[in-house]
Image (spheres, grey):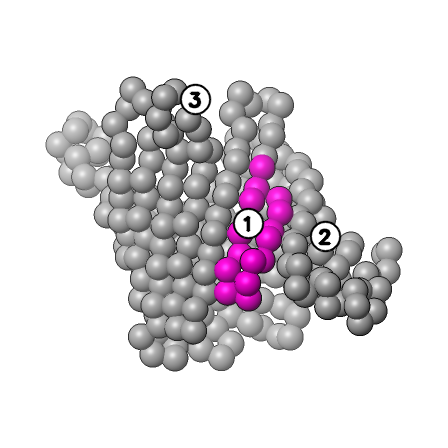
Amino acid sequence: MGNLRWTPQWVTRTQTQIDPRSPQSMLQIENEYTGNDFSASVKVLNPSLLEGGLTAIVIGDYMQSITPKLALGLEGVWQRASMGAKPETAVSYAARYKNADWIASAQVHASGQLGASYWKRLSEKVDAGVDCQLQFAPGMGGAGMFSGMRKEGQTTVGVKYNFATAVYRAQVDSAGKVGCVLEKRVGPAITLNFAAEIDQWKGTHKLGLGVSIETSPEELEAKMQSGEIQNDIPPPY
């Protein structure tokens, strides 16, 4: 995992995941630009030209502020699993309302999925939130293809606690899955990530370790010249 900030508005993020138990690895490249009243990003997952053409998942989104608190946006997805498959596209629409200590958002997907989330700052160090997803699939009921509408939903509740040099996140969802992440800052541009996940119903668990490197040449150079770089390194505990 690595971040490179080209300008104060433009940042590039890369993430690589290698699982020896799975034949597929993951590569993600994201470019994000934040303006005065808008934000835009393009994300590419697992790009490849080995089959004589582009196979990847490309996600582009744009969010525009309508008022100081209300923002509207849309997201487009293009994906092709292989050159023998046809490309697939999807569009979703989003709205976000931001207050001083809480944020509410909603999404509508063309596939029939509805999403809503609410985030609240409980104190200076503690944040909490809830996310609800509802999927409608026409003609997929249990009695046959034309039996009516199938509805599936999932709710996730999460909490975040900010330490002096670390961030702890934990969540649990209605499917019985529990997860937690600890982000520990060990240098001015290096962060260690420890993650764990337990699926109660399937009886499975996952453990992970990640390293995030953020490069901002202008900021790091200024800190090194002023001597502030030593003060950014947290104690080893």
Q: Position of residue 33 (x, y in %)?
A: 45, 60
Tell me the quarter of the picture where residue 104 sits.
bottom left
Mark before the other along the chain sequence, 1 or 2: 1
Residue 190: assigned label: 2
Who's the residue at 44% across and 77% down the image?
99
Who's the residue at 26% across and 40% down the image?
89
Q: Mark 3, residues whose alpha carbon is within 10 Å: few (<14), some, or many (≥20)?
A: few
Name the kind of residue labelled 3 in the image. Answer: Leu
Q: Mark 1, residues whose alpha carbon is within 10 Å: few (<14), some, or many (≥20)?
A: some
Q: How many marks?
A: 3
Residue 116 visible in image = no
Marks 1 and 2 sit apart, C-alpha to C-alpha, by 14 Å
Residue range corresponding to the magenta coloring:
1-16
Tell me the quarter of the picture where residue 71 sits.
bottom left
Q: Secondary structure at mark 1?
A: strand
Residue 13: assigned label: 1
Who's the residue at 29% across and 20% down the image?
84
Mark before the other along the chain sequence, 2 or 3: 3
Q: Position of residue 182 (x, y in %)?
A: 68, 51
Left or right, 25 with reference to 93: right
Q: Position of residue 165 (x, y in %)?
A: 75, 62
Q: Secondary structure at mark 2?
A: strand
Left or right, 17 with reference to 109: right
- Most extreme residue toward the right, as rendered? 236
Q: Which residue is mark 3?
A: 50
